[in-house]
Image (cartoon, rainbow, N blue to C red):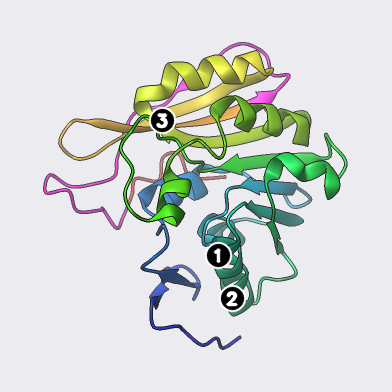
Amino acid sequence: MKVNLSKDERLEDLQCKGLKIIQNKNFYTFTSDSVVLANFIKLKKNDKCVEIGAGCGVISILLSAKTEFDKIYAFEIQDEMARLAEKNVLMNDLEDKICVVSDDVRNFKQHFEGESFDVVFSNPPYMRNDIARGKNPIKDKARHDEMLPIGDLCKTAYNLLKFNGRFYVVYTANRTAELIYTLVENNLEPKRMFFTENGKGKVILVIIEAVKGGKHGVEVLPHLETNDINGEYLNILHTRYFNN
């Protein structure tokens, strides 16, 4: 579907089966966080999924190219971002596979029954509220966890998932202990996890797959380097975690 771009929008090629994405310079734009998480997520043909915090829709759109699934309901709390995500879904002719829901995911019972999804995934806002903010409220809401505290994130994922359902999440590495504690507190048992490095030896992100009601025991995978020594994003990432 052909779409018209506003003066603040740009069209980018995702370099994946012809998919494209519109980004707005005034909104939060996706980074390697989203790409790494999309590559890590495992889906099955009949999986019903929820994305928490869809942003421009890039993770759900990338998943449409790498795996089969029944349907993704992509929740986005900010109306401006939800409209952009919907625009991206329509542009890529994915409206039969991805449904953007412009609402706070904590209101999911207004849309669905609880414990009815196979997979939940999220690249949520993970900066603490005491970290300095910028001058753009849309970007700030996408970065700071005031809109979705870590406890609400994990509790909502638990309430959405069926027993043995899978939750995939990327978070800032310096809150790893808090994330794992909160997952376990909500009966979401970490099963696989790894960290990303920035090319200079600094650990940046933690990515976790947790299972609702899963048994104890987590496989810790090797770190993934996402940038070169100059900080440039590596276009070709290692694929050791990314095969379904």
Q: Is residue 230 rendered to the left or right of residue 151?
A: left
Dot 1, crowdedness within 10 Å: few (<14), some or many (≥20)? Answer: some
Q: Mark 1 points at which residue?
A: 80
Residue under the image location 57 percent in, 22 percent down = 191
SS at mark 3 in the image: loop
Measured in 3D between alpha carbons, the distance from the residue under mark 3 to the one under mark 1, in whole angstroms, is 23 Å
> In the rendered structure, which disc, 2 or 1, sits on the residue that comes first in sequence?
1
Quadrant of the drawing holding the C terminus: top right
Residue under the image location 71 percent in, 71 percent down = 95
Tell me residue 149's x, y (percent): 55, 30
For badge 1, the amino acid type reads Glu
Q: What stretch is highlighted in magenta?
A: 211-236
> In the rendered structure, which disc, 3 or 2, sits on the residue that comes first in sequence?
2
Nearest the eye: 12 or 17? 12
For badge 2, the amino acid type reads Asn
In the figure, residue 91 lies in which quadrant? Answer: bottom right
Q: Is residue 167 rendered to the left or right of residue 40?
A: right
Measured in 3D between alpha carbons, the distance from the residue under mark 2 to the one under mark 1, in whole angstroms, is 19 Å
Dot 2, crowdedness within 10 Å: few (<14), some or many (≥20)? Answer: some
Which numbered dot is residue 92? 2
For badge 3, the amino acid type reads Arg
Q: Is residue 224 magenta?
A: yes
In this rendering, does residue 62 appear at all? yes
Tell me residue 127's x, y (percent): 40, 35
